[in-house]
Image: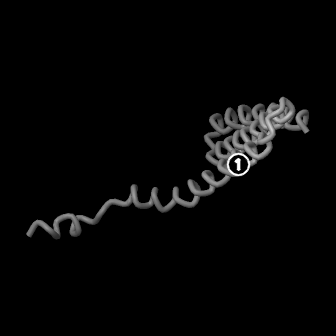
């Protein structure tokens, strides 16, 4: 299991750097997002790797801690994705001139 997690971390980091480089060259936001998807996969595998090593070193709750870390990563990413569009819409929408001057009369 630890060997697979280590290979996953290394592979996903390589994919992150290559995909991000190509996204900058091509100016593709889709590739840039995919690069960060590779990075989040790498972080998840790193949490599994650290949890596995800690478990082998005798920390009995390492597997539970790694599971919680991965769960929090997934949950926070999902919350950010759900909130980003409405928040960006609110931030980028400018009020109409009539609405701005309505309270001045």
How busy is the neighbourhood of tag 1: few (under 14 within 10 Å), some, or many (20 plus)?
A: few
Pick the quarter of the image with the N terminus.
Answer: top right
State the image coordinates of residue 51 (x, y, percent, origin top left): 79, 37
Q: Residue 29 vs residue 12: left or right?
A: left
What residue is rendered at 29% in x and 63% in y? 95
- Between residues 24 and 13, which one lies in front from this camera angle? 13
Height in image: 70 above or below 19?
A: below
Name the quadrant containing residue 37. Answer: top right
Residue lying furthest left = 105
- Between residues 20 and 56, which one lies in front from this camera angle? 56
What residue is rendered at 65% in x and 42% in y? 32
Pick the quarter of the image with the C terminus.
Answer: bottom left
Height in image: 59 above or below 100?
A: above
Circle 1 SS class? helix
Q: Residue 58 vs residue 40: left or right?
A: right
Q: Residue 82 vs residue 50: left or right?
A: left
What residue is rendered at 16% in x and 65% in y? 101
Name the quadrant containing residue 41. Answer: top right
Height in image: 102 above or below 28?
A: below
- Number of dots carrying numbers: 1
Display colour scheme: one colour
- Between residues 33 and 75, which one lies in front from this camera angle? 75
State the image coordinates of residue 58 (x, y, percent, origin top left): 83, 32
The residue wearing badge 1 is 68
Height in image: 47 above or below 68?
A: above
């Amino acid at each position: 299991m630890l060997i697979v997690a280590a290979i996953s971390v290394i592979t996903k980091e390589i994919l992150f750097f290559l995909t991000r480089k190509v996204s900058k060259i091509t100016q593709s936001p889709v590739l840039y997002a995919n690069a960060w998807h590779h990075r989040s996969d790498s972080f998840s595998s790193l949490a599994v790797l650290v949890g596995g090593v800690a478990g082998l070193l005798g920390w009995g709750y390492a597997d539970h801690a790694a599971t919680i870390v991965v769960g929090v990563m997934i949950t926070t990413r999902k919350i950010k994705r759900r909130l980003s569009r409405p928040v960006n819409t609110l931030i980028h929408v400018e009020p109409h001139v009539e609405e701005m001057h309505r309270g001045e009369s």
